[in-house]
Image (cartoon, rainbow, N blue to C red):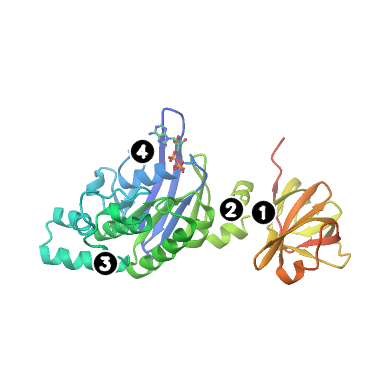
Amino acid sequence: MSIQLSIRDLSKRFKTGDGVKGISLDVIKGELVTLLGPSGCGKTTVLRSIGGFLAPDSGDIQIRGSSILHLPPEKRPTAMVFQSYNLWPHMTVYENLAFGLKLRKKKKDEIRGLVQEALKLVQLESAERKLPGQLSGGQQQRVALARALLLEPEVLLLDEPFSALDAKLRMEMREELREIQRRTGMTMIFVTHDQEEALSISDRIVVMRAGEIEQLSTPQEIYDQPRTLFVAGFIGRINLIKGVSTGRSLAVGEARFEQEREVDGAVIAAVRPEDIYLTAEQEPNSLPGTIRQVMILGHYAEVSVESGEQVLKMFVPREQSARLSSGQQVRIGFSRVVSFPAPEA
Ligand code: ATP
């Protein structure tokens, strides 16, 4: 496993006081790493620093062991795909793709072969002679992707590339990007504020908050083992419940739960809707509740259960949900809980 991109202690402070602080990150060759976080957390600042569109105040960025900070964007072994495609409107698709290769003094025949290959990779063989304005948003983004791939960058940078597309197309493009990455083995850094997108396409996710890295792990780990309350709340659906913890023993109301981590004092227990189950038993690790709402969502239902002073959301398989109705008394258990020290009021 060789390290393709290494970011060391990167900081950038804008006049407004915002920016990024001490970002360090190693990306392995062939990996797709996503920078994820709410608007303004610094994702684009990191991406633009790698691409050379922004000069950091301190820190270093290396590709295969050599610093690239002194290089202008066009000399860096990177290419960037933007949300807004940035295609040349008066050039055909072919010309848009051939342009960068001409600058690199490639021969005409070679250019033709490479462009055709790239169009095939993004499934746009028939669009060669069209102008960008004659293509749909998804097709234009495919052209932009092909153009970036043709530059054979050591690291491909993608800045919210699919966020202007509709939901269905966005899903298709994610699958396609993954497939292209698998076939080309290209190292990619992907920026998004969409947690579902990040979970579905990444090898690893960097969750950012206010200019710093909050957690850096695989999608599975980020989902199952959020390290902070912020990550727990930001990724996926989750119930946040007040409790009290002593070591691994967590008390929520009258119920007691075992948890993996040790925490002491007032806590916020985080439980995913799929980790709450209905139980007939008077188990010590169950809570009484009243069903407030059953919402059918296709193959499962989302059920709201009022327990004590909180309303918890749980997912229930469709067959089971048919037997549930509003006002019904139930008991609920948690199959998995992670708790965090309660933020001071
Ligand atoms: P978004 O998803 O909204 O693009 P982001 O996570 O990519 O957000 P950045 O664009 O990296 O965030 O911005 C980080 C912070 O730095 C924000 O508070 C932003 O307002 C600020 N910022 C970014 N660029 C500049 C600039 N050129 N001048 C001043 N402040 C800036």
Rendered image: mark on residue 126: 3
Question: Looking at the picture, which amino acid does disc 3 mark?
Answer: Ser
Q: Position of residue 323 (x, y in %)?
A: 80, 68
Q: Is residue 39 visible?
A: yes
Residue at the extreme front: 134
Q: Evaluate if marks 3 and 2 touch, with contact meaning CB atoms under 8 Å apart.
A: no
Rendered image: mark on residue 238: 1
User: Mark 3 and mark 4: span between their CA atoms?
Assistant: 42 Å
Density class for disc 2 (Cα within 10 Å; few <14, some 14-19, many ≥20) is many
Q: Position of residue 237 (x, y in %)?
A: 64, 54
Question: Looking at the picture, which amino acid does disc 2 mark?
Answer: Ile
Q: Is residue 64 visible?
A: no
Q: Quadrant of ligand 1?
A: top left
Does residue 343 appear left or right of residue 163 in this picture?
A: right
Judged from the image, the secondary structure of the residue bearing numbered disc 4 is loop
Does residue 165 appear left or right of residue 299 in this picture?
A: left
User: Mark 3 and mark 2: span between their CA atoms?
Assistant: 39 Å
Q: Evaluate if marks 2 and 4 touch, with contact meaning CB atoms under 8 Å apart.
A: no
Q: Give the labeled residue for mark 4.
A: 56
Q: Nearer the viewer, mark 2 or mark 4?
A: 2
Judged from the image, the secondary structure of the residue bearing numbered disc 3 is helix
Q: Residue at x 69, y 40 (%)?
A: 343
Q: Nearer the viewer, mark 3 or mark 2?
A: 3
Q: Earlier in the sequence, mark 4 or mark 1?
A: 4
Q: Residue at x 29, y 52 (%)?
A: 133
Question: Looking at the picture, which amino acid does disc 4 mark?
Answer: Pro
User: Mark 1 and mark 3: span between their CA atoms?
Assistant: 45 Å
Q: Earlier in the sequence, mark 3 or mark 2?
A: 3
Q: Earlier in the sequence, mark 3 or mark 4?
A: 4
Q: Earlier in the sequence, mark 2 or mark 4?
A: 4
Rendered image: mark on residue 169: none
Judged from the image, the secondary structure of the residue bearing numbered disc 1 is loop
